[in-house]
Amino acid sequence: MAFRVLVYTRTTDYRHDSIPDAVAAVRELGGAHGFGVDATEDPAAFEGPLDAYAAVVFLSTSGEVLTPRGREGLRTHVESGGGFAGVHAAACTEYGWPYYGELLGTWFDRHPAYQPGRAVVEDHGHPATGHLPPVWEFTDEWYDFRANPRSSARVLVRADETSYEGGGMGADHPLAWCREQGAGRVFYTALGHASQAYADPAFRAHLLGGIGWAAGVSG
């Protein structure tokens, strides 16, 4: 896995306390698996070429986090074959930019209380899910989305709304998925709210598989 990723954690709305632990986890994964990790909150990072990076990772970003030039930089990166991985609040990002919703597949709508629940693995044939059990017990915020991304994405994991309180999407509730955008690859997981997730071996392997797939080095 000889490649580099750019981890972006800028927030202009809600800021997750878990961000430092999340960045540390990605750095540790990079050290263990041979890929480089740069982390930034500077929107200028997207205003020039992103050719040095196999993938960019929006890690619990929120609100409007890119300049107009930065938006074009990200679009060019993905459309020309670069990877994009979104984690958790990446879906609460760039509501004012229609392309971002297309890229990700949907946007965040709401979530119930942070609580235990069950995630059902639909597709074990992906690096982000191959290690997971058929039913994955996890604790998170169980995001609801404005629209179901299934029509444009390969759904990997869905929420079992009978296993927790307050779900709003029904029986078909995607939580993690991947898709192609232009010549690029896009991975998203709604999980990863709390610092505890980034210490969880199963979640870390989920994250590693998603980043590697987006970067085009696995799967």
Image (tube, grey):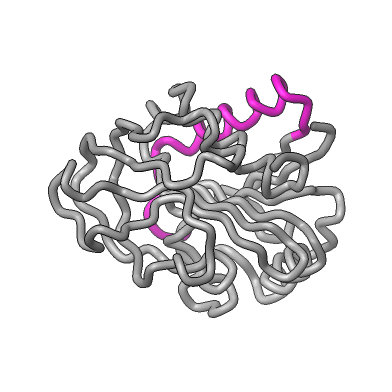
> Closest to the observer: 100 or 116?
116
Residue 29, quarter of the rendered image: top right
Please identify the dominant SS of the magenta region: helix
**Residue 140 appears at what percent x and percent y?**
30, 40
Residue 125 appears left or right of 60: right
Note whether 92 is above or below 8 in the view shown: below
**Residue 214 appears at what percent x and percent y?**
68, 49
Whether residue 60 appears in this view of the structure is: no
Whether residue 184 appears in this view of the structure is: yes
Q: In this picture, which residue range is highlighted in magenta?
A: 12-36
Image point 33% across, 41% down: which residue? 119
Note whether 123 is above or below 18 in the view shown: below
In which quadrant is the C terminus drawn?
Answer: top right
**Residue lying furthest left:** 165
Q: Is residue 91 magenta?
A: no
**Residue 80 appears at what percent x and percent y?**
81, 66
In which quadrant is the N terminus drawn?
Answer: top right
Q: Is residue 16 magenta?
A: yes
Image point 45% across, 60% down: which residue? 91
Note whether 6 is above or below 2 in the view shown: below
Residue 131 appears left or right of 42: left
Residue 4, quarter of the rendered image: top right
**Residue 69 appears at what percent x and percent y?**
73, 73
Image point 46% across, 73% down: which residue? 95
Image point 78% across, 25% down: which residue? 34
Residue 187 appears left or right of 13: right
> Closest to the observer: 13 or 75?
75
Number of numbered discs overlaid on the protein picture: 0
